[in-house]
Amino acid sequence: MERKDIVIVGGYGHVGRLICSKLGEIYPGYVYAAGRSMEKAETFSASTNGKVLPLLLDINKAVPASLLASVKLVIVCLEQENALFATTCLQAGIDYIDISASYRFLAEVEQLHDLAVNSNSAAMLSVGLNPGITNLLASWMAEKVDHTDAVDIFLMLGLGDTHGLAAIDWTIRQAKTDYYKWIKGKQVKLKSFGGMKSAYFGEQLGWRNAYHFDFADQHVLHHTIAVDDVTTYLCFDSRFATGALAFLKAIGLIRFLPIRLSTKLLTRISIGKPMFCVKITVSGRKSGKPIVLETELYGKEEAKITALVTVWAACYMCENNSCTGVFHMEEVLDWTALQDELKNYIIWEAPQLLQKEQ
């Protein structure tokens, strides 16, 4: 049987709906919004006039091979506890995309590289805004210098944006949890929303304090572009919200923050704008002299951008991919191609020299 179907797990969720709708326009009748609620899947399918079809699928249970027999590509928009479903897909020769921002999970999928090669399948990871755009842009900038010493990635999220419940829940959980990352050959423990660093986000946004946060890009870029020191920082467009979360972390009260209540409140209270901003600073050497480059990228509706990046990656996997194995987006795709795809949705300030060669 020729494989043509595309299954989006979590396809009727906040980001999944956007991905399904876009892919449904490109591949009508071959896109499935999958999840544990057939009722929700069917309701969403009806809203697309049948361009997106419903599918009952629980990836936390064993998935019958017959259910995936016609599937070419699976896209997962949910956080997972383990890589069992990814293993099932790759073992069956099905290509796989994941938009997870958790490196603990992505590291498990990385271990499936040989399985994917042997099954003639491929998995693309680090797809979205962060990780995703941040990976591609940092990789592209690192190519502009002879040697990269350090990469700092700053992400500002607008609290006035519409974020899915799962995304807010994940962010709060990550803020509570400390993590380890490689720095100068050693694994160093960092506190989420500790380790403040100030960054200038342009004339309109000005200087902001941002804090360590466990996004996957800093772990991935450490080995995909061989940079010893990569650090990701997070802040919100509301200085008050950023400072309040950092204060709760500093005095230890953040561990008592009720996740469910906090998630519900943040979905109802709008104290910012529907925006995001990415700032990347690359420090290194060129022609034997120290050099620092920085760039900023601005946009609205983080979920929409994540969906557009995912659709772009999915089309590549369906039509152009000849790779097998597990790879991150920056290992096979290029920032300039994505930038051209997103030019109507983002404002990108091309890299500027911060420190002249000495």
Image (cartoon, rainbow, N blue to C red):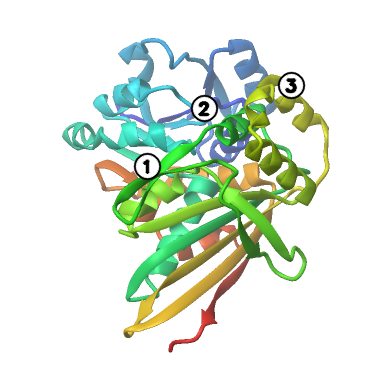
Q: How packed is label 2: few (under 14 Cα within 10 Å), some, or many (20 or more)?
A: many
Q: Is residue 332 visible?
A: no
In front of the other: 217 or 302: 217
Q: How packed is label 1: few (under 14 Cα within 10 Å), some, or many (20 or more)?
A: many
Which x, y percent locates residue 93?
Answer: 26, 29
Please state, as top left, top right, bottom left or bottom right, where the C terminus lies in the image.
bottom left
The residue carrying mark 2 is 78
Q: Can residue 10 be seen in this view?
A: yes
Which x, y percent locates residue 182?
Answer: 35, 49
- The mark that comes first in sequence, 1 or 3, is 1
Specify the label residue 124 is tagged with.
Answer: 1
In front of the other: 146 or 66: 146
The residue carrying mark 3 is 261
Q: What residue type is labelled 2?
A: Leu
In front of the other: 139 or 72: 139
Up/down of 55 relative to 307, above or below: above
Up/down of 264 relative to 117, above or below: above
Q: Quadrant of residue 314?
A: top left
Q: Quadrant of residue 110?
A: top left
Q: Cα distance, mark 3 to mark 2?
A: 21 Å
